Image (cartoon, coloured by chain):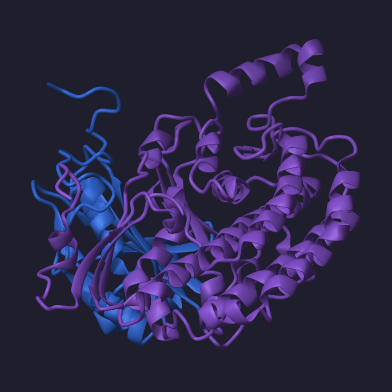
Chain colours: A blue, B purple
Amino acid sequence: MITGNLSEQPLAAEIEAFDAAAILGGKFDRSELTLEIAPAKIASVCGFLKHELKFVRLSGITAVDRYPADPRFEIVYHLHSVERNQRLRLKCRVGGEQPEIDSVTSVWRGANWYEREVFDLFGVRFAGHPDLRRILLPDDWEGAPLRKDYPITGFRV
Amino acid sequence: MSEPGVPAMDVLLGEAQAGPRRMLLNLGPQHPSTHGVLRLAVELDGETVVKCAPDIGYLHTGIEKEFEVKTYQQAVTLTDRVDYLAPLSNNLCYCLAVEKLLDLEIPPRAQWTRVMLTELTRLNSHLVWLGTHALDIGAMSVFLYCFREREDILRIFEMFSGQRMMTSYFRIGGLALEPPRGWQNRVKTFIAGFPSKVDEYEDLLTENRIWKGRTVGVGKLALEDMLDLGITGPMLRAAGLKMDARKDAPYSSYDKFDFEVPTRAENDVYARYLVRVQEMRQSARIVTQALEGMPSGDWKAADQHVSLPDREKMKTQMEALIYHFKIVTEGFRVPEGEVYQVIESPRGELGYYVVSDGTAKPYRVHMRTPSFGNLQATAAMVEGNLIADLIASIGSMDFVLGDTDR
C-alpha cells in the first residue's frame, strides 16, 4: 500500500506492480527511501529488485530492536544499484517468541554473513540459511547482546 | 582444536574426504600473515586448496552495543577503534550520518580539512597494506620504506589532534580543535616529496620478476561473484568497475576536487596492487589541492546547541558557559529518524546506519564495514588454487580484523 510522499517514488510503484501485497508502508525522508515489506514476501521482492531493477548489490543486513513494541524487530536491508546509482532500504518487522524470517542468501550469496550476524546478536532466525551459526560471539555464548533487554553491565544470576 | 566456544575444524569444513594427499590445516587465529586474528580452516589436496572457511570474531568488542550508552559526541571516540588503520574515515562517516540527522551545515574550512585528513588516512592505510602485503610475499625492504612515510603521516595527525592513531579529530559539527599553527608547512613538505616515494616503491615492485610471478594471474574472481558476495573498494576497481562513493555520491565537498578513480581490468592480485598505488598518487593530488585551496573561516558549525563554545567566550559569557555545561553533561538531542551514510574508506564501502529516537544517545548504530564484506569472499577466491597463493590472495583483500569483528 503506497501512501503519502511514497507515491512520487517510481521504485515503490514498480514493486507494487510486481506484488500488490508486498509494500506495507514506508517513507522518503532525508533523501533516503525506506519501504516496509511484508516479511513473507522479502525473498521474492529482493529477487525482483536484483534481477529486474538492477539492485545487484546487497550493502548489508542489520536489525533494530524496538522492544517493548510488538513485533519488536525491524530487519533492515540496504540495497545498492551501481547502474542506477541508487540506494534503497527495505524493512521487515518480525516478532514473537522465536522471531524468524526467510533468508535472502538465495538472492545474494553475500547475505550469508550478515544474516549470521543478525542471528548472533539479535537471535532472529533465517529460514533457509545454509549455515546459521554464531559468527562474532563464541559458540557457547548465551543470549543475544544487541537486544534492548540484554543487560549492559553484569549478568543476571 | 577443541576449546569451548571455538568452532571445530569439521564444523567449519564439513566432513573431510579421506585420501593420501588430504590434509587439514588450521591457519591462525594467531598467524603473521592473517594480519590480526583471522582464522582460516583449510582442507588441502596436496598443495591445492579444496575448501577454505574463515572463522572470525576473535576481536569482537561489542562496539555497536556501546554506542547505545554514549551521547552522540562521546561515541566519536568509539569509531576510531573500529578500523585502527583508518580512524579518520570512521570519524568522518559517523559524523556525516549524525549531521544528516541533525540537518547541520558544516563550514567549508572544516569540510576541506576533513577531506585532506581522510586522504592522508588513505595514504596511511595503503602504506601499511603495501608494506605488509609485500612482506607476506617476501619483499622485506618495501615494508621499511612504507613505514618511514607512514611515520610522517602519523606525525601530521599528532600535530592536528594530539594523537597518532586514535585521533577522534572530527566531531559532530566540525573539528575537535582549530587546525594548529604551521600545519601547512608540515603537510606541504610531506606531500611535495611523496610522489617520488611512490616511485621508489614502484621501482622495487612493479617490474620485479618475483613480485609479478607471485601476483600476476593470482586470486582471480569474476566481477559478478564479487558483487554478489559484497566486495567493494579497490578490489572491485581492479576488476574494472568504477565504483567509488567519492564520485557516485560526493560528501564533504569531494565534488570540488579534481581527481581520478583508477581502475584495471586484469582482476588479479597484481592489478589490485596497481590500483592501490595509483590511488596513493590520486590521494596526494587531493591533499595538494586541499592545501592550496584551503578556505578560511570557521572550523565548526554555528549551531550553539551542537558545537562547543569558544574557550574565550566561556570565560566571559554566562550563556556560553551554560551551553558548554549542557552539551558536555547531557549531550544534544537528535531528531527522530534514521540515515545510512556511505563513504569510500581505504578498504571500500563504509556505511554507518544511525537510528535516533529523539534522545541524546543513539538508539542503534550499525557499521557496514568493508573488511567484513570483503572477507566473505575468501573461500570463493582461494578454493581450487595453490596454498602458496592463499597468502597473496588474502593479502590483496586488505582487511583489518578490528573492522571485521567490531
Residue B328 vs B197, above or below: the answer is: above
Can the viewer see residue B144 in this picture? Answer: yes
Q: Is residue B224 left or right of residue B261?
A: left
Number of callouts: 0
Q: Is residue B30 above or below residue B227?
A: above
Direction front: furthest residue: B20
x 27%, y 76%: residue: A45
Task: Locate residue B41 relative to residue B99 in the image: left or right.
Answer: left
Residue B395 position, x and y percent, is 48, 66
**Hey, which quadrant is residue B143 in on the image?**
bottom right
Q: Residue at x 91, y 45 (%)?
A: B185
Relative horizontal placement of residue B146, taking residue B107 as reference (left or right)? left
Nearer the observer, B395 or B249: B395
- Which x, y percent locates residue A29? 48, 57
| Image point (60%, 73%), residue name | B273
Residue located 42% across and 82% down the image: B221
Describe residue B349's horizontal placement relative to residue B61 as left or right. right
- Up-down relation of residue A110 to residue A19 (above or below): above
**Can I make out residue A21 in this image?**
no
Q: Is residue B281 above or below residue A67?
A: below
- Estimate the x, y position of residue B97 in percent, counting from the top left: 54, 49
Q: x%, y% of residue B223?
A: 45, 84
Residue placed most toward the observer, A50 or B141: B141
